[in-house]
Image (cartoon, rainbow, N blue to C red):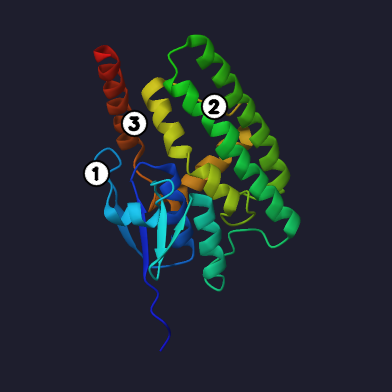
Amino acid sequence: MGEIMEVKLLGVWYSPYAIRPKIALHLKSVEYDYVEEDLFGSKSELLLKSNPVYKKVPVLIHNNTPVCESLNIVEYIDETWNSSGPSILPSHPHDRALSRFWSSFVDNKWFPALKLAAITKSEDAKAKAMEEVEEGLLQLEDAFVSISKGKPFFGGEAIGFMDICLGSFLVLLKAREELKGEKLLDESRTPSLCKWAGKFLSDDTVKNVVPEINKVAEFLRELEVRAQSAASRS
């Protein structure tokens, strides 16, 4: 008999970062137990013990050994279950380097600008941040055309590393569109990304993992009310 692999994922339902390992685990057909954390209340002892440095989700616990940080977890899943399901990272070293480069761009430059635009009270800062967001999407449009080589995903015929990275934010973008009327993915400016987004969200693996757009929109609305209430008391 083979060794029993115990796999547990700590996350929160609305987090784009927690969506990433869920997609990877489903792509690899790995069974796992999911533990929902409450980041606004009391974080579990398991989370604090498993990620004592950042105390954040997601955390993958594999045979009692924790792995932290979303894209690090995705790589771990790809390497650990390398004989199951499609490869998530490209096989060629240069293609892998490109995937990591653009994923870093998304996490360290593009999404922080989007986050700043959402929370800043300064109209000037918001306008500048939105310019960065829109410019970043144009750069990602060009990157997709180059990397996909005419295929439906960044990963080619199947969902890959960069698809998981950027795709994890699509529900958030759609929710903001529903809530604010901000259509960041525009067919006239980013036609390839728009087509890719539709393909990604309609994939069976992704559909079974991502939260409902209207549920995320309602959550964002509640966060906004909380922030306004806190501001009025200060």
Above-or-below relation of 173 to 50: above
| Secondary structure state at the residue bearing disc 3 | helix
Q: Position of residue 226 (x, y in %)?
A: 27, 24
Point out the image quarter for the N terminus: bottom left
Quadrant assignment, res 31:
bottom left
Residue linked to disc 3: 217
Amino acid carrying mark 3 in the image:
Ala
Amino acid carrying mark 1 in the image:
Ser
**Left or right of 92 on screen, residue 79:** left
Above-or-below relation of 177 to 34: above
Residue 42 is marked as 1
| Secondary structure state at the residue bearing disc 1 | loop
- Spatial distance from mark 3 to mark 1, Cα to Cα? 24 Å
| Secondary structure state at the residue bearing disc 2 | helix
Q: Say which residue appears at 35% left-offset and 44% top-offset.
A: 211
Q: Position of residue 77 (x, y in %)?
A: 51, 63
- Spatial distance from mark 2 to mark 3, Cα to Cα? 19 Å
Residue 113 is marked as 2
Q: Rate crowding at label 1 as few (under 14), some (14 to 19) or many (20 or more) other CA atoms within 10 Å.
A: few
**Left or right of 46 on screen, residue 79:** right
Point out the image quarter for the C terminus: top left
Residue 177 is marked as none
Going from N to C along the chain, the mark reached first, 2 or 1, is 1
